[in-house]
Image (tube, rainbow, N blue to C red):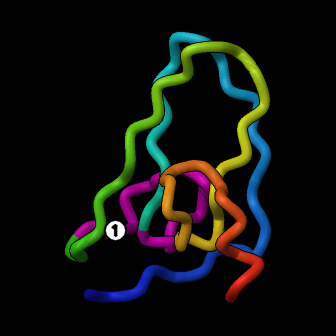
Amino acid sequence: MTEPVIAARAPIVVAVEAGKTYWWCACGKSAKQPFCDGSHKGSEFTPVKFDATESKQQWFCACKHTASPPLCDGSHKKL
């Protein structure tokens, strides 16, 4: 399996809106981090759907190594 590109070594905080759907970039190549811009096309990666159930700040993984995608679990501290 191909390793994702590490987009950043810290999470990206995003104010999400309840009822909206967000597509998290899993490959790390998107120019719109932490979200997908289609850069994964032709690779084995696919974006991860995130449905916001409430409006609040979420910490999205940017290192792409989280065990709980799309949210940060602190994996960037071990890279």
Q: Is residue 6 above or below residue 61?
A: below
* Quadrant containing the N terminus in the rendered view: bottom left
Magenta: main secondary structure: loop
- Residue 74 position in % (x across, y down): 72, 65
- Residue 30 position in % (x across, y down): 52, 65
Is residue 61 in the magenta section? no
At horizontal 29% and vertical 68% (from top left) the residue drawn is 45
Q: Quadrant of residue 18?
A: top right
At horizontal 26% and vertical 67% (from top left) the residue drawn is 41
Residue 54 relative to residue 15: left or right: left
Is residue 37 in the magenta section? yes
At horizontal 74% and vertical 39% (from top left) the residue drawn is 14
**Span shown in magenta:** 27-41
Sort mark 1 into few (<14), some (14-19) or many (20+) by Cα contacts within 10 Å: some
- Residue 69 position in % (x across, y down): 49, 53
At horizontal 47% and vertical 58% (from top left) the residue drawn is 25
Number of residue marks: 1
* Quadrant containing the C terminus in the rendered view: bottom right
Q: Is residue 56 above or below residue 33?
A: above
- Residue 7 position in % (x across, y down): 64, 74
Mark 1, secondary structure of its residue: loop
Residue 45 relative to residue 67: left or right: left
The amino acid pointed to by label 1 is His
Residue at the spot of label 1: 40
Q: Is residue 28 above or below residue 21?
A: below
